[in-house]
Amino acid sequence: MLIVKSIILGIIQGLTEFIPISSSAHLIIVPWLFGWTEPVLQSLTFDVSLHLGTLLALIVFFAADWVRLIGAWFKSIFQFKIGLDPDRRLAWFIVVACIPGTIVGVLLEGKIEALFHPEGAPLSTGAMIAMAVIIALLALLLFLADRLARHERPIGAMKWKDSILIGLSQALAIFPGVSRSGSTITTGLALGLQREAAARFSFLLSAPIIAGAGLKSLVDLLQSVKAGAITGTELTLFPIGFVVAALSGFLCIKFLLRYLQKHTAAVFVYYRWALAVLIAIVALVRR
């Protein structure tokens, strides 16, 4: 059953990292709903495997984009010129947009995580209600951005202010329930980007942040391995979580980019509202 649970959480990570419904919230909510209390499922080892899996999905799916954008970024540095080259501009938009999320993550991530999910302590009713409220509020913002803005601008029409605003919104993803993709896609839609363009920039933007957080966690994990603090079960579940998260993440990116070319984000809004109601009801009943 532990292997089955790890597969389920791997699928959830791959899906919810890119669909605007919050991966961090779902990795808390699912074990909480079903009473999964195994420490290994909440361990640093398993968390690293899931995030490295979704990072691999991003790298593989956008491989051609990364080669082009990284090359353009280095050329802009060597030539000391960005100009009107769309690849150079997009590469620097990603760099600029990463700055707010990186700063907030370094300064506040541990504090926010301890507030919502203290280590060794059960989830409180207040924390779950707060998460439900956050999930519902972001759904409202996504609904308004999706319905009211004119989604006419392709990714090539982005400006510096767009990258800054989207980057600032990404910093809000430190709160479980906001969703990194949810906050950045919502802001992109509000700024008038096409739905597919907003999602594409959101996914490209998430890669450096996931890579940075994953690298930090991987360093901590290697230190634990050297100290002999990693169990055999954790090592067994690591490749399972990694592979499942990578496969489900890859398929999710492919699906969502195609879906948003012809559909609105309404289904994600309604799902978030339904999830918020479910969390609130269960939290109050278990109180």
Image (spheres, rainbow, N blue to C red):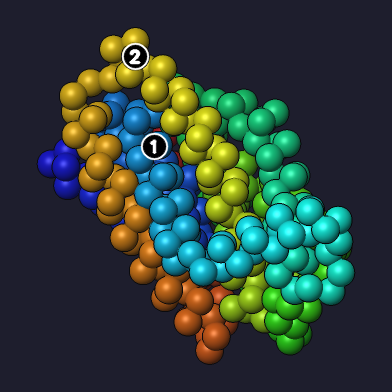
Q: Earlier in the sequence, mark 2 or mark 1?
A: 1
Which residue is the site of mark 2?
Answer: 226
What percent of the width, then of the height, locates residue 91?
Answer: 70, 61
Q: Which amino acid lies under the numbered mark 2 shown in the image of this protein?
A: Lys
Q: Residue at x 33, y 35 (%)?
A: 46
Q: Nearer the viewer, residue 182 or 277?
A: 182
Q: Quadrant of residue 39?
A: top left
Q: Quadrant of residue 149?
A: bottom right
Examine the rendering and report whether any part of residue 282 can be seen.
Answer: no
Q: Which amino acid lies under the numbered mark 1 shown in the image of this protein?
A: Asp
Which dot, 2 or 1, sits closer to the camera?
Answer: 2
Q: How far apart are the alpha carbons under marks 2 and 1?
A: 18 Å
Say above or below: 204 vs 192. Answer: above
Q: Residue at x 37, y 17 (%)?
A: 224
Give the secondary structure at mark 1.
helix
Quadrant containing the N terminus in the rendered view: top left
Say above or below: 123 vs 62. Answer: above
Numbered mark located on residue 181 in the image: none
| Residue, far left | 1
What percent of the width, then of the height, locates residue 27?
Answer: 40, 44
On the rendered structure, is 77 left or right of 225? right
Does the residue at mark 2 contact the one at mark 1 (Cβ under 8 Å)? no
Task: For label 1, count other residues whose C-alpha is less than 10 Å away and answer few (under 14), some (14-19) or many (20+).
Answer: many
Q: Nearer the viewer, residue 57 or 114?
A: 57
On the rendered structure, is 160 left or right of 228? right
What percent of the width, then of the height, locates residue 257?
Answer: 50, 76
| Residue, far top | 227
Give the secondary structure at mark 2.
helix
Q: Nearer the viewer, residue 187 or 245?
A: 245
Which residue is the site of mark 1?
Answer: 47
On the rendered structure, is 218 left or right of 152? left
Examine the rendering and report whether any part of residue 3 can be seen.
Answer: yes
